[in-house]
Amino acid sequence: MIVIDPGHPSEVNSGRAIQNGTTELEMNWEVAERLVKILESNSHLRVLKTREVRDSFMSNKDRSATANKASATIFLRLHCDTGSGSGFTIYYPDRQGKKNGKTGPSQEIIKQSGEAAHFIHRGMCEKLGNCLKDNGIKGDSATFVGGKQGALTGSIFSEVPAVTVEMVFLSNKSDAEFIKCEKGKQSLAQALAQGVFLWVREKEIRK
Ligand SMILES: [Zn+2]
């Protein structure tokens, strides 16, 4: 089972701020839908989105709960970054964090999330080539929220490997043009799917 989490609207923000003529909520959702289709059509995988309605609010804790309940092979979370950079960045919980009295994830999940992040990164590099800048793999603790809590909320509550992909910097004009066009969205979905396939294959080899 693969759980795809199109980021926002959550307690952190709605994802509805307009940047370069679009919103993060819209882009996350549209790539997620394409990714789910690719995963469902190309493999024996079962795929679940954390929610079925784009605009419905869901807390980050509840997103993790969905992935945990499904015993997901990966809890893959799609976001777009904002700021002065460009390109894609992959995050995983590199240490435990604390939120609402909960400390997590476990050391085993930290290890597995790091491994999953490696395969997602490899898949994305294979499929994206030089279309987008590769910012590599970083720890949740390097994010704004993760810096304060130790890890992202969705990671703290995750009992399965959790990987967050900031697909582009929506604040960057050329990144925004890339993800807004059909070809770019499809390329991102294929790149993410490739990463998932590599991770699933790795898990099967290890069995
Ligand atoms: Zn986001």
Image (cartoon, rainbow, N blue to C red):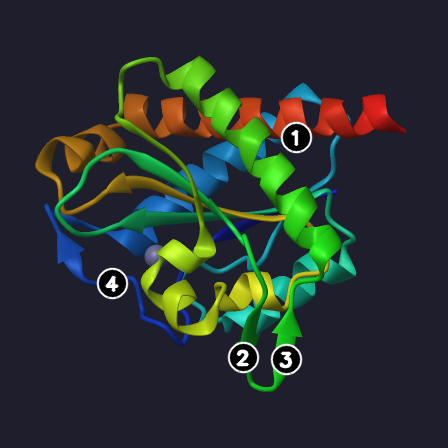
Q: Position of residue 168 (x, y in %)?
A: 28, 38
Q: Secondary structure at mark 2?
A: strand
Residue 154, quarter of picture: bottom right
Would you say the residues marked 1 and 3 are in contact, meaning their CB atoms lie under 8 Å apart? no
Does label 3 point to a residue whose CB lies under 8 Å from ligand 1?
Answer: no
- Specify the label residue 99 is tagged with: 2
Mark-to-mark CA distance, 3 and 4: 29 Å
- Label 1 sits on what residue type? Glu
Would you say the residues marked 2 and 4 are in contact, meaning their CB atoms lie under 8 Å apart? no
Q: Report ligand 1 position as a quadrant.
A: bottom left
Image vertical order of residue 55 relative to residue 183, above or below: below
Q: Earlier in the sequence, mark 2 or mark 4?
A: 4
Q: Is residue 31 left or right of residue 87?
A: right
- Specify the label residue 40 is tagged with: 1
Residue of label 4: 16
Q: Is residue 32 left or right of residue 61?
A: left
- Specify the label residue 102 is tagged with: 3
Q: Secondary structure at mark 1?
A: helix
